[in-house]
Image (cartoon, rainbow, N blue to C red):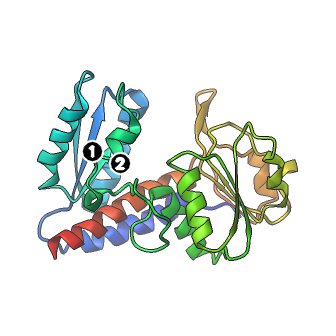
Amino acid sequence: MIIDGRALAAEIVSDIRKETAGMSGLPLLTVFTCAPNFETKKFLDLKTKRAAEAGISVSVIELPPNVTLTQVESAIQQCAVMSDGIIIQFPFPHLATKDLIELIPKELDVDVTHYMGQIDGLLPPVVGAIAEISRVHNIDWAGKSVVVVGSGRLVGSPAAQYAASLEAVVTVVTKDSNNLATTKDADIIILGAGSPGLLTPEMVKEGTVVFDAGTSEEGGMLVGDADKAVANKASYFTPVPGGIGPLTIAILLKNVLYLAKLHRK
């Protein structure tokens, strides 16, 4: 079954809208960016559009290319008082990702960059998307063999933590590792390598669940880590585009609402 992430995302956005309609003052998401390229601007426009549909206000603050870490910290502190969520939109030239993440107040961290493996409450957007699909389709994780391809901070690392918290047997591999073939015996595969067509039909067994959260550009098109033919063998398959991607934005907005409600208490 091919998962329609856009439809699931629309349902979440609609539910958020119902709640924000009754709030005094729209929740505010503040996004910091620096020297955004075309792709980043396009993604920010999409976030802003979806946020408006959900009844959430977005303030995008573009910092100068030569901004210092101290200046970023000062900007965040100034906006923190009025914000319900704060995002640093990467890539961020010349400043270390780790240092920038540490500047985000945990009570405003809607990307959940400080994720500790929890399965309830605030979840990183990719993890939240996987959790939502699992909930809707009753996908069981306990005791299942899960292979995570990639160990990055956005997909691989949090996805592996999440699967382990659900008592799955987790193996993390990379696109260059010599144990990539472990996907052949996996019950669930999570892709986050950013390598077009890395996972082929010969590398999966019948009935495997495939969460493709790897994205890259090939021939001017957005593509995932899985060959599209993998869908013919998978019991559930998230396509790129249209699968995990739309859901991550919806989960992000859900996190903004979650924190906004806490702040208003």
* 121 up-or-down from 55: above or below: below
The image position of residue 162, as x and y in percent, is 56, 65
Vertical arrangement, residue 218 with respect to residue 76, above or below = above
Residue at image mark 1: 31
- Which quadrant holds residue 84? bottom left
The N terminus lies in which quarter of the figure? bottom right
Q: Quadrant of the C terminus?
A: bottom left
Tell me whether the residue at label 1 lies in contact with that at label 2, contact meaning CB atoms closer than 8 angstroms. yes
Question: Which of pointers 1 and 2 lies earlier in the amino acid sequence?
Answer: 1
Foreground residue among 181 and 258: 181
Q: Amino acid at mark 1?
A: Val
User: In the rendered image, which residue does mark 2 sit on?
Assistant: 47
Task: Determine crowd level at label 1: few under 14, some 14-19, many 20+ residues with C-alpha closer than 10 A.
Answer: many
Q: Position of residue 163 (x, y in %)?
A: 61, 66
Instruction: Name which residue lies at 31% across and 48% down.
Output: 87
| Secondary structure found at label 1 | strand
Residue 4 visible? The answer is no
Looking at the image, residue 218 lies above or below residue 115: above
